[in-house]
Amino acid sequence: MTPSERAAWLRAEIDRHNRLYYIDETPEISDTEFDLLFRELQELEATHPELRTADSPTQRVGVDPVTGFDQHRHLVPMLSLDNAFGEDELRSFDERVRRALGTEEPVTYMAELKFDGLSMALTYEDGLLVMATTRGNGEVGEVVTTNARTVRGIPYRLLDAVPGVLEVRGEVLMFKEVFDRLNRDRMARGETPFANPRNAASGGMRQLESKLTAIRKLNFFAYGVVPGTSGLDMGSQSHTMAWLRQQGFPVRGEGRLCHGADELVSFANHVETMRSSLPFGIDGVVIKVDSLDEQRELGFTARGPRWAIAYKFPAEQAFTLLEAVGCNVGRTGTITPVAELTPVYVGGVTVSRATLHNYDELARKDVRPGDTVIVQRAGDVIPEVLGPVLEKRPPGAVPAPIPTHCPQCGTELVRVAGEVALKCPNKACPAQIAAKLIHFASRGAMDIEGLGEKQIVRFLELGYLSDLPSIFRLGELREELIQLDRMGEASVSKLLESIEASKSRPLDRFIYGLGITFVGDRTAQTLARQFGTLEAFRKARYDDLIEVEDIGPRTASEIEEWLEEPDNQALIDGLLALGVVPSEADAPIGDRFAGQVVVFTGKLEQIDRSDAEKLVTRLGGKAAGSVSAKTTLVVAGPGAGSKLDKATSLGIDIIDEQAFFDMLPANVR
Ligand code: IVH
């Protein structure tokens, strides 16, 4: 393909994806893939300026508005921002800004969340909302005033009767919780679910009947004022935001003033880590030179301002091919379907396998080998397949068969009465043993460094491991281990030291490591605290267990059943005989939190969350994972999201980390 053919192809392709995105609301590619196409065209046009056409998508934003709404020519075009991917590009933006301003000094920037919704321009006259418009093609947008009146947070009237015309810009979006609920309802009615909250919001804004907008429960956050409107000049972006907040606009509090590139980089990293805990989607941070004088000095290019940039995070969703549906055998023999995917970069990592949860879920989602599927990896959550892109289903694609026999040991599978799960009943199934060992050695349990999944599978194959106690006999095989490929003296010593150290892990980690059904890390902590010693725990029966707060009948019977099984008691004896001595639960140290139910949310700077929770329990209180009517106190750090919102709406006391420390008795601070 010649450069000119490639440019024409890129233009057509970008236009097609723009239409799919903005008008049909059924995108076929991820934002990252779109950005790559766009960049390639930009670069091609930069090296071959003769290929740049007036109608090239690089010369405009979005797509022409569709009919159905009145059109409005924006007073000031609604431009888009240039993107920066990664730290280097962020630093070059800062260098460009400093060069243009002719300064060596660090520039002051306002760094804000980049909301993943649709932009909206709101016009106020003498303090009253008179018009709301979408971005449209950047020059001309659609008038959606009645719809905008149904959006939460868009004020009809400002606090002050700001004289003249004021134009405020911001983003309309849908909260994740609303999106999930709407999609559940849609699926229950047999309707196609929305692809993502942004599509749902943008479709909602462009309904011809505003009642249909209202039921989508959209939200709005303001991010700027069109300079010059209402004769206002706040001097800086940060002052503008403070003023908007005073006038009654919803303004998120995460924005920060940053001095120079290092602070920008650390802000961007901070936001990236708390991204998944926000109650709505963001796709990056927007960085703006704070001073309006400096903004004017920097000015604009054809596409956007020189004083701002969008620092984009890796997309959390991507499209890829479902090559096959395999299955995984869990530590209790549960068989779960697993998607085997053409590797795809999503949420910052390359994903080639993703869970499909169980066979009912697989049937409900109806993803078939050969399908193009949407894969999501949000935050630290394990990757999952959201669903198929039906338009791309190849003819003849059929659902993957449900297995009848264990893929590892060939035993016939059983379906446990009343449960959706398929199970392999063979306790000696090698896959179950491997899964048990992996869980026992994992970070949240015995935390044995150097004994991860790969190593465990290898040692099982060599016969060096066979069950949990065999881990503590690995020392006898020191010479054999050293001879292994990629092992050597040093790593074997490290591994054996780490095994030795794990022998005295706290009781709760040991209990968690046993892998009893329904006993997660939090339940294990409760059990360790309640029973205090391993001896007391291993004698517990249903009646003792059901007394424990937070342990329901199902968990109590599972634990009782596990403890009554002679093989399991023998397993504990075996571990004790090999020198495993779980250290006993932390003793109470006071009653400062007696009667309190405390929830920690957001990032804590000075203490680990699990240590903070331990302090609360040792001081007579209860630490919970989610906010409910029972919660009495919420400790919120930076990045606190939906839990904080919920606590606010329930009127629960909210304090910061320092105030929490101030509550502690002097001897434990
Ligand atoms: S300022 C001159 N601030 O991102 C453009 N935009 O690519 C000024 N967006 O269309 C835009 N959060 O819809 C700005 N805090 C924020 C934003 C934000 C999201 C969107 C906006 C714009 C796009 C820019």
Image (cartoon, grey):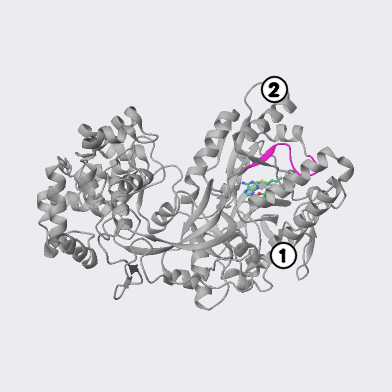
Badge 1 element: loop
User: Residue 136 is drawn in which quadrant?
Assistant: bottom right
Q: Amino acid at mark 2?
A: Thr
Q: Earlier in the sequence, mark 1 or mark 2?
A: 1
Front residue of this view, candidates 519 and 223: 519
How far apart are the alpha carbons under marks 1 and 2? 44 Å
Query: Would residue 593 be seen by someone viewing this image from the given angle?
Result: no
Where is residue 14 drawn, in percent x and y? 75, 55
Which residue is label 1 attached to?
Answer: 23
Where is residue 637 drawn, in percent x and y? 41, 42
| Range covered by the magenta-colored residues | 301-311
Q: Nearer the viewer, mark 1 or mark 2?
A: 1
Badge 2 element: loop
- Crowding at dot 1, Cα within 10 Å, few <14 / some 14-19 / many 20+, comes out as some
383 with respect to 152 (left or right):
left
239 with respect to 516 (left or right):
right
Q: Amino acid at mark 1?
A: Ile
Q: Please check the rendered image and state whether residue 410 is part of the magenta-colored stretch, yes or no.
A: no
Query: Would residue 124 be seen by someone viewing this image from the given angle?
Result: yes
